[in-house]
Amino acid sequence: MNEPAVRIDKWLWAVRVFKTRALAAEACHKGHVSILGHAVKASRDVRGNDVIVVKKEQMTRTFKVLQVLERRVGAPVVKEYMEDQTPAAEFQKPRDPYFHPIAPRPKGSGRPTKKDRRVLNQFLP
């Protein structure tokens, strides 16, 4: 009963979750990829029916492995290899956090002076 398995970084790249395998490995290294609630290393093997949680940008995506593969496939074929179980609420999250300057400066006022910078630094952590 030798189930086929493939490295998680390779699988994430092959099903187009990440653009490059290096980015997939980096996400694993940073702890953004988990299986069963545990962060995994890039060398962790993936098998059928594993549920993978990936934190990418501001979203937390959930994927179920249907089949393993080692070679990158076209986007229309990806649904044969994985099932996207990401809740709809994740897609409703704003892409960029709302940015509101703490201390707005008038346009054309130039660079902050030393005194201005000290005042700004009081607000920053």
Image (spheres, rainbow, N blue to C red):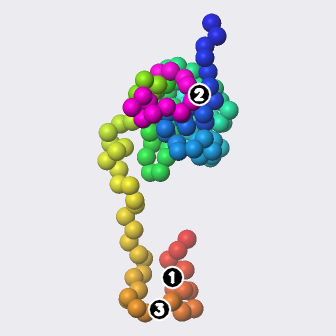
Three-letter code for the amino acid on which mark 2 is drawn:
Glu
Separation (CA) of disc 1 from disc 2: 51 Å
State how many labels appear.
Answer: 3
Callout 1: helix, strand or loop? helix
In the rendered view, tell whether residue 81 sits above or below residue 106: above
Question: Looking at the image, can residue 88 be seen?
Answer: yes
Please say whether residue 36 is one of the residues in the magenta stretch: no
Query: Mark 2 and mark 1 in contact (Cβ < 8 Å)?
Result: no
Disc 3 target residue: 110
Disc 1 target residue: 120
Three-letter code for the amino acid on which mark 3 is drawn:
Gly
Which residue reaches farthest front?
74
Disc 2 target residue: 70
Identify the image quadrant of the C terminus.
bottom right
Determine whether, in the image, residue 43 is placed left or right of residue 113.
right
* Picture quadrant of residue 20: top right
Q: Which residues are magenta?
A: 66-78
